[in-house]
Amino acid sequence: MCRTVDLRQAVLARNTMAAGVLRAELTARGTTVVNLLSSPGSGKTALLERELTLARERGVTTAALTADLATENDAARLARSGVPVKQVLTDGLCHLEADMLAGHLHDWLPDATRLLFVENVGNLVCPASYDLGESLRVVLASVTEGEDKPLKYPTAFGLAQLVIVTKSDLAGPAEFDEAAFRAHVERVNPGVEVVLTSVRTGEGAGVLVDRALAAADGDAVHAPVMARAEA
Amino acid sequence: MHEMSVALSVVDQVERAARSGGASGVRRVTVEIGELAGVVPDALAFCFGLACAGTVLEGAELVTRSLPGRASCTDCQRSWDTGMPPDLLCAVCRGGAGVLLSGRELRITEVHWSTPPTAPDSSPVPRSEES
Ligand SMILES: Nc1nc2c(ncn2[C@@H]2O[C@H](COP(=O)(O)OP(=O)(O)OP(=O)(O)O)[C@@H](O)[C@H]2O)c(=O)[nH]1
Ligand SMILES: [Mg+2]
Ligand SMILES: [Zn+2]
Ligand SMILES: [Zn+2]
């Protein structure tokens, strides 16, 4: 009387479905989401503050949501750019999920937002597994984190649609081997673009806004080999 | 933490299937985990035990099957084991026209229901046709 049923069911199906719904809803109202992932302290907030300011100066309507385990510090920093900012405290949860994001956007996201940047919790492990309905997923790593970061976190780097190297002003002192880093990225995610930035020297200024606008305009976004398996 | 939410999701989906199928207990759940899925089987097993408490899955066993990462090149048709960390570049073409054949799976493949407590004891039977 025991029976075994074959239950071919994706474990993350619920999140994937919620992400799909959110993407469709936001696309319908003209909003494109950019999901930013990195280890703690790679420079997500610093880069975003610069890019949000640039977007505002260019007249692009932008908003940002930042998720942290605790403190509202990042929202206070991002708000200096003058764009609408929301802080989400995850209360110990180490990543954002699509339905959480949808809940937070519900009564906050200003109507005419063209680009919504989401700073995920600083963590390169599980945020990689959760689609947030984004149209562009960006993974950041600073030059001080070692060239082999893409090999240590292959899921995060393997699913990135844009890789940003931050703190390039420190590349010399950190003896950052750019060629090795690029080769490691290429191994887990062939063809993905890698861009160097620094908020100190201004290197790569505007790259995030440019790539986000391209995605918003419907330009083809990089399709990682690892993501192509999901079809 | 990721494994905990994966475990909760497994429990949630099995509970739903139990409700719709009228099952009162679960003996075993089998989950397939691709090498590149980013889930640690041991951590998942630990979380699964916690997530089952007080549900229809209480006491259920979790069996995890690991699937290797395999990629193939659309240019030269070669296929290979990706290893971990994965190498998704074709060794011959060094191009990026590859596809991942397997390795990202994360799915429940089988649930072995137990009999209601009132029914006579019985031994497991192979997978039924009712999938
Ligand atoms: N030299 C240098 N320092 C930088 C740069 N970008 C960020 N930093 C510094 O790096 C530290 C961390 O930057 P954040 O922007 O807070 O990093 P984060 O990724 O948002 O950190 P979490 O939100 O905690 O995960 C700060 O002290 C920044 O001033 C840069 O381009 N160059
Ligand atoms: Mg931050
Ligand atoms: Zn997490
Ligand atoms: Zn080839």
Image (tube, coloured by chain):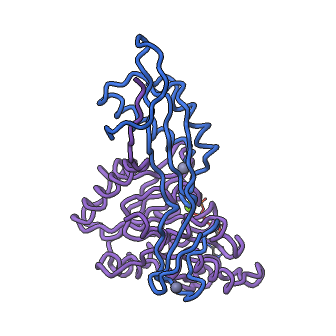
Chain colours: A purple, B blue
Q: Nearer the viewer, residue B28 or A195?
A: B28
Q: Residue at x 70, y 70 (%)?
A: A145
Q: Is residue B91 left or right of residue A111?
A: right
Residue B126's spot in the image, x, y percent?
A: 44, 35
Quadrant showing the N terminus of chain B: top right
In the image, farthest residue toward the left: A28
Whether residue A75 is visible? no
Indicate whether A62 appears above or below A196: above
Q: Residue at x 36, y 29 (%)?
A: B18
Residue A109's spot in the image, x, y percent?
A: 31, 57
Indicate whether A5 appears above or below A165: above
Residue A62's spot in the image, x, y percent?
A: 36, 69
Q: Nearer the viewer, residue A63 or A165?
A: A165
Residue A97's spot in the image, x, y percent?
A: 43, 51
Q: Residue at x 44, y 44 (%)?
A: B108
Q: Residue at x 51, y 29 (%)?
A: B52
Q: Is residue B100 left or right of residue A169?
A: left
**Badge count:** 0
In the image, farthest residue toward the top: B118
In the image, farthest residue toward the bottom: B93
Q: Is residue A160 left or right of residue A110?
A: right
Q: Is residue A199 left or right of residue A26?
A: right
Quadrant showing the C terminus of chain B: top left
Write down the quadrant of residue A59 in the picture: bottom left
Q: Nearer the viewer, residue A93 or A204?
A: A93
Indicate whether B15 appears above or below A198: above
